[in-house]
């Protein structure tokens, strides 16, 4: 069975880049009728926070990316310890004692000599006595996985055939000096034991993938199918990380962006398929094809979410927004009309409040000096409210007769006098909603 996972570290809020990872994994699982696991990568007890675990769940819920089960790495430390023991027994795991400063120095030397900065495996030559001496002097060492120096190859779901020379990669540290299990080990143990078949993640993980393939094989597992999506940049190609603060999903949510707008954009951005608004998750699942995505960095502009949000809102019928409209205080008798009239004229739902206030309290009239007399004459002909769907037609007919004005010269000053705006919904639809006409004087 196809099984995917989204594996955030609960050290912050989900941002638009993580969402892409979550969405791709979700869509692959759903398209195949498989399982989607939410895995909380919380092996770092200092940086992981429960509030972020809750926030991640809320954000995924808001988007409708429902998971089949939750796994937490902090509850599986014994599994990682067992895997570490297995690697030790196989002679694929060794303790190293270099301090960060020493490692840094080694790297600089290598770079100066024009060599790649790969860990030199000096620790492999330590005798038991030397290790004991270092341990008593410096405490526990870190544990590194001994890579086999051969080419590591896989067919990537997005990048195609990949071949990485293991000798160009440092033996990865899997356990920190303080005993903390690191993500690389935890992740391969989980992916193997949880039967994960497909892993999609950002292209910043390509080197990790190479080492993970070797670790999985060493532990007797079968590597999943890997795919690495490109990273997002800002609209000008600038690194997104600089602006992450504003691109947390919760900030987008608060700005009124609709989930289907976010999902529609992110399921297509960076692929050769056009971005199209989808109103149902099922359509997104059906139309998703990982092989259509390219490896080039993908430009993301949060502004693109607003036209999609506006178009999405236009597709909603009254019943799906009934409660929100009632909450604005729109009387039942006007509520459905209020929605059908305004939905074409809003970008986000937060615009509804302003429309309702305008209808309820009347707009500040905008009357150009040359129209003042005309508007005054028209107002005298305006019947008492409440208005209905015929009011506009009957009234402007009478005003035309009385003043001889017609077309734009007739309608525009009246629209501006009644709504304070040059544009907006059809005035025949506006009139029945209008409770007060300030321009009556
Ligand atoms: N916790 C890791 C991250 O957020 C997961 C990467 C992966 O998908 O394996 O980068």
Image: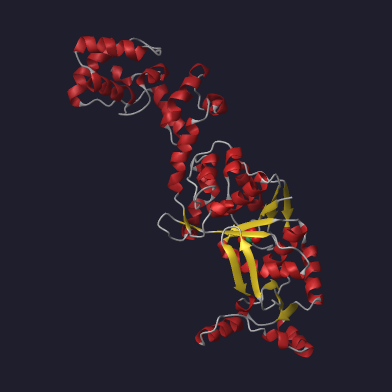
Residue 313 percent across, percent down from the top left: 49, 33
Q: Is residue 302 visible?
A: yes
Taking 234 as reference, is 380 above or below it?
Answer: above
Question: What is the quadrant of residue 398 in the picture?
Answer: top left
Q: Quadrant of ligand 1?
A: bottom right
Q: Is residue 10 visible?
A: no
Q: What residue sits 68% from the left and 59% below the top?
A: 41
Q: How many marks?
A: 0
Residue 193 percent across, percent down from the top left: 77, 59
Question: What is the quadrant of residue 306 in the picture?
Answer: top left
Q: Nearer the viewer, residue 103 or 331?
A: 103
Residue 270 percent across, percent down from the top left: 50, 53
Tell me if 108 is positioned left or right of 85 in this view: left
Q: Nearer the viewer, residue 103 or 66?
A: 66
Taking 384 as reference, is 38 above or below it?
Answer: below
- Identify the coloring: secondary structure
Residue at the extreme left of the image, as rendered? 370
Taking 212 as reference, is 292 above or below it?
Answer: above
Tell me if 76 is positioned left or right of 250 in this view: right
Residue 112 percent across, percent down from the top left: 50, 86
Q: What residue sits 61% from the left and 38% below the top?
A: 282
Q: What residue sits 65% from the left and 71% below the top?
A: 152
Question: What is the quadrant of residue 326 in the picture?
Answer: top right
Q: Quadrant where the C terminus lies?
A: top left
């Amino acid at each position: 069975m196809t099984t995917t996972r989204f594996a955030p570290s609960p050290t912050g809020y989900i941002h638009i880049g993580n969402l892409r990872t979550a969405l791709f994994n979700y869509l692959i699982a759903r398209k195949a009728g498989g399982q989607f696991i939410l895995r909380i990568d919380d092996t770092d007890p200092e940086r992981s926070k429960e509030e972020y675990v809750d926030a991640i769940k809320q954000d995924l819920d808001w988007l409708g990316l429902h998971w089949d089960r939750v796994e937490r790495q902090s509850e599986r430390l014994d599994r990682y310890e067992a895997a570490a023991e297995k690697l030790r027994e196989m002679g694929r795991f060794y303790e190293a004692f270099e301090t960060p400063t020493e490692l840094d120095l080694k790297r600089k030397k290598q770079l100066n000599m024009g060599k790649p900065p790969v860990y030199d495996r000096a620790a492999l030559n330590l005798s038991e006595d030397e290790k004991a001496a270092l341990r008593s002097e410096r405490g526990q060492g870190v544990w590194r996985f001994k890579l086999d120096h051969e080419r590591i190859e896989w067919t990537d779901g997005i990048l195609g055939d990949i071949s990485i020379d293991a000798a160009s990669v440092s033996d990865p540290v899997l356990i920190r000096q303080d005993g903390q299990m690191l993500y690389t080990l935890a992740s391969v143990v989980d992916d193997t034991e949880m039967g994960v078949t497909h892993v999609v993640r950002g292209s910043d993980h390509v080197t990790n993938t190479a080492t993970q393939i070797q670790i999985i094989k060493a532990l007797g597992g079968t590597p999943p199918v890997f795919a690495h999506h490109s990273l997002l940049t800002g609209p000008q190609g600038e690194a997104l990380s600089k602006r992450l603060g504003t691109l947390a999903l919760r900030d987008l949510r608060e700005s009124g962006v609709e989930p289907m707008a976010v999902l529609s954009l992110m399921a297509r951005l960076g692929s050769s398929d056009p971005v199209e608004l989808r109103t149902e998750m099922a359509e997104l699942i059906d139309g998703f094809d990982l092989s259509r995505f390219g490896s080039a960095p993908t430009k993301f502009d949060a502004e693109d979410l607003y036209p999609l949000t506006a178009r999405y809102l236009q597709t909603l019928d009254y019943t799906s927004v009934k409660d929100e409209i009632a909450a604005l205080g729109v009387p039942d008798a006007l509520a459905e009309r209020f929605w059908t009239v305004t939905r074409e004229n809003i970008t986000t739902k937060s615009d509804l409040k302003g429309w309702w206030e305008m209808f309820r309290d009347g707009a500040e009239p905008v009357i150009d000096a040359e129209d003042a007399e005309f508007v005054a004459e028209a107002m005298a002909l305006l019947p008492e409210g409440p208005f209905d769907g015929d009011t506009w037609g009957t009234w402007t007919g009478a005003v035309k007769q009385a003043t001889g004005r017609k077309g734009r010269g007739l309608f525009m000053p009246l629209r501006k006098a009644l709504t304070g705006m040059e544009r907006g919904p059809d005035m025949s639809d506006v009139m029945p909603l209008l409770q007060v006409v300030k321009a009556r004087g």
